[in-house]
Amino acid sequence: MRLQSRFALIAGAITTIVSLSIGYFTISIAFNSEIQRVDSLITKVSDELDARDPLSSAVFLADESDSQLIVALLDSSGELLTVRTSKDGKEFTASIAEAKSALRNIKTIGTELRYRGLTFTLEQDAYLVLAVPIQDLEGNRNRNIQRLALFLALALLLAFLATRILTRPDIRKIERLAERARDIANGRNWREEQVTNGNSEVDDLSKALNQMVRYLQSALDGERRNSEKMQEFVGDASHELRTPLTVIKGYIELLGRSESLEPQARQRAIERLDSEISRMERLISDLLLLAEIGEAQGGVLDDAINLSDIIRVHLTDLKLLDTNREVEDSVTSEVFVLGSLPHIQQLIANIFSNLRRHTPADAPVYVQLGYEPQGVRLTIGDGGPGLPQEAYTSGIQQFQRFDNSRSRESGGSGLGMSIMQAIVTEHGGTLTLGPSRLGGLEIDIRIPLREE
């Protein structure tokens, strides 16, 4: 059964129950009140009857009351006579058995004509009957019942029309929402529904559906981007792995002809094999690290890490290994962050490794570490060649090498920046690449503080 039909049925049932209850109660009260009035009249006359001549006194009291009271006599021969008719001329027509059934108790008697009657025993097996016709009262009651039925029919019609008029706008909204939900399930319609400024439950449902559509669109867009990135990553990884495998295969074939190979060439081939195998190991290690960081996203990062100590260790190594490099040190003591200690150590190690690998030994460096209102900020800049301008705007891409100096021969896998970006993201921070004030590359890392 459709929703609007159920609403109409409920409204009709409630209207019927309420109308019948009120109408029946009112009609019953009115009818019983008239019956009580009639019974009071009969009781009053019966109480004032003269015991010496009850028939005459009954007629006298009936005339005095100017009422519909009928006085009848049932003599010893079994003949029923109407001594006094009602005000409008009605006689007592009930049977003898019915008349005797009202002996000493007021009750309703009669078949064709209905009476409220009371019967008294007289001398010589005679009976005196006091009765009031009530067919007019019963007729009024029946007419009231008919009016109630007509009123109930009108009330049901009004309830149906009111239910249809009041619920139709919301029903139409629900039908549109159901159609939209089917379209969304079939992938045909992803537009948002225009929600009115109403405050009904249907408007709330429309807003919730719009929110769900936005969430699904965002999730699908994210899934699509992730799929594209995954395909690109798989392609780049396959290419990066294919290159050393090709080199290794070539040198193995060369070593297979070792009879005609000079010792020096054989030694160079072995060294080249070792170099390519080491490069593959580093590439696989970087891939596993990226996978580990990805799996740890949303995990518990509860190591209290003294970032200042880690930075100072690497600064000391840099100064010892590159004695001609000028290092500007602005590191605040006891700067702590919550996170993964191995990953933070990997992040800092990658930064300083890139410094030594891709900048001249005498290129100046500045390192700044400290707290700021949003958390911890680490800035490392150098006076090296820097990166192409598009690298600062396009962001970090996996397997990306920004210039020829950062080639495979330098030992890079192209994943160093991706690993750094993943570690910072794992800790809820941001990593930004930009030109430094010394003319080279500046890495700006911001990690928010947590209340724990």
Image (cartoon, rainbow, N blue to C red):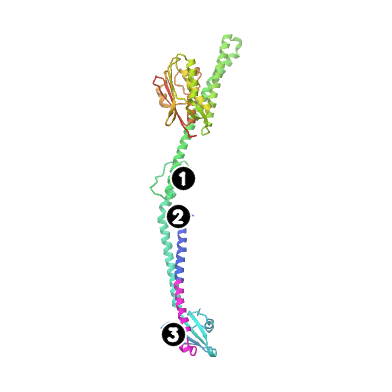
For the residues labelled 1 and 2, the Cα–Cα distance comes to: 19 Å
Q: Secondary structure at mark 3?
A: helix
In screen coordinates, is 121 left or right of 206?
A: right
Residue type (three-letter) at the residue carrying disc 1: Ala
Judged by its main secondary structure, the magenta piece is: helix
Badge 1, how many Cα within 10 Å: few under 14, some, many 20+? some
> In front here: 220 or 179?
220
Question: Taking 447 as reference, is 388 above or below it?
Answer: above
Q: Earlier in the sequence, mark 1 or mark 2?
A: 2
Q: Earlier in the sequence, mark 3 or mark 1?
A: 3
Q: What are the residue bounds of the magenta stretch?
A: 29-57
Question: Taking 112 as reference, is 211 above or below it?
Answer: above
Q: Is residue 120 visible?
A: yes
Q: Secondary structure at mark 2?
A: helix
> In front here: 264 or 82?
82
The residue pinned by badge 1 equals 181
For the residues labelled 2 and 3, the Cα–Cα distance comes to: 62 Å
Q: Secondary structure at mark 1?
A: helix
Q: Earlier in the sequence, mark 2 or mark 3?
A: 2
> Which circle marks residue 4 in the picture?
2
Badge 3, how many Cα within 10 Å: few under 14, some, many 20+? many
Q: Position of residue 114 (x, y in %)?
A: 48, 79
Instruction: Judge depth for marks 2 and 3 and give the one in front.
Output: 3
Residue type (three-letter) at the residue carrying disc 2: Gln
- The outermost residue toward the right is 259
Q: Position of residue 80 (x, y in %)?
A: 50, 87
The residue pinned by badge 3 equals 62
